Image (spheres, rainbow, N blue to C red):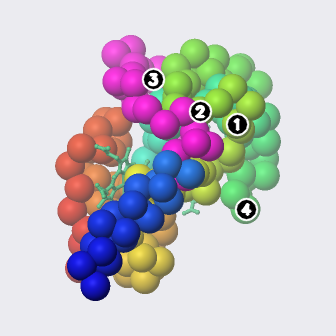
Amino acid sequence: MKFTKPLLVLAMASLSLAACARYNGEDRGKPMMPNQVNAKWQAECSGCHMAYPPGLLPAASWKKIMSGLDKHFGTDASLSPADTAEISAFLVANPSNRWSSSAAPLRTTESEWFRVKHGEISAAVFARASVKSKSNCVACHSGAANGDFDDRTIPK
Ligand code: HEC
Ligand code: HEC
């Protein structure tokens, strides 16, 4: 039985390698939040959830999200054409660099990248009353609204 542990480590290493291959694999130090934050984005995109930092998704994802605000995850989040264009320009100018250029997920939480980062957290934990949804980043990352995901605590 003395080979069990190294084998397990090897199996885990190859699993995470396989998972990593689908996104760029490196968090190349790009901040989630740019220094200059757009005021309209801050005001209009934080009404129902925290304003998700632009660095969470690639530009193609932001384009899709901003062109479908009237059917936004089961709600109507539509804005005037001028506000939509301004916010869209801000998001598209500050995208994630963690993706291959063809990736365009609508949700951070359905991405390979999110699964890699949260592989150890069970569905039951995400379903807790104190969390409710994977998308509720602030439940565990107190600095999430500022683009800071370094601090994390899993609420009981
Ligand atoms: C009327 C309410 C409402 C407004 C306003 C709103 N959203 Fe949402 N948004 C939602 C709901 C509901 C979800 C799904 C949340 C969940 O599944 O827990 C969501 C999810 C998202 C997600 C996916 C989160 C994930 O799982 O990774 C993104 C990205 C997003 N919204 C961006 C935006 C942007 C950008 C704006 C501003 C233009 C915006 N939202 C404004 C209701 C809203
Ligand atoms: C149930 C709690 C929980 C929720 C909800 C959650 N996270 Fe996490 N997150 C964690 C934990 C715990 C870790 C650390 C995992 C590890 O190191 O094994 C983590 C790691 C991360 C990391 C990696 C940080 C680093 O230093 O490498 C990022 C980025 C991240 N989460 C983003 C998000 C985003 C974006 C959301 C919402 C869309 C979210 N998380 C929702 C608990 C959570």
Range shown magenta: 19-46
Frontmost of labels 3 and 1 is 1
Residue 29 included in the magenta stretch of the image: yes
**Residue matched to label 4:** 74
Q: Residue at 69% across / 26% down in the picture?
A: 101
x and y percentages locating residue 129 in the rendered image = 38, 81
Marked residue nearer the N-terminal end (4 or 1): 4
Q: Earlier in the sequence, mark 4 or mark 2?
A: 4
In the image, taking residue 70 as reference, residue 119 lies left or right, namely left
Label 3, label 1: how far apart the Cα atoms are: 27 Å
What is the three-letter code of the residue carrying label 3? Ala
Dominant SS of magenta comes to: loop
Q: Position of residue 9 (x, y in %)?
A: 34, 64
Q: Is residue 136 visible?
A: no
Label whose residue precedes the other's in the sequence (3 or 4): 3
Q: Quadrant of the N terminus?
A: bottom left
Separation of residues labelled 2 and 3 (CA atoms)? 26 Å
Going by the numbered disc 2, the residue's amino acid type is Trp
Q: Position of residue 82 (x, y in %)?
A: 71, 20
Residue on which the image places disc 3: 39
SS type, badge 1: loop
In the rendered structure, which amino acid carries the disc numbered 4? Gly
- Residues under labels 1 and 2: Cα distance? 6 Å
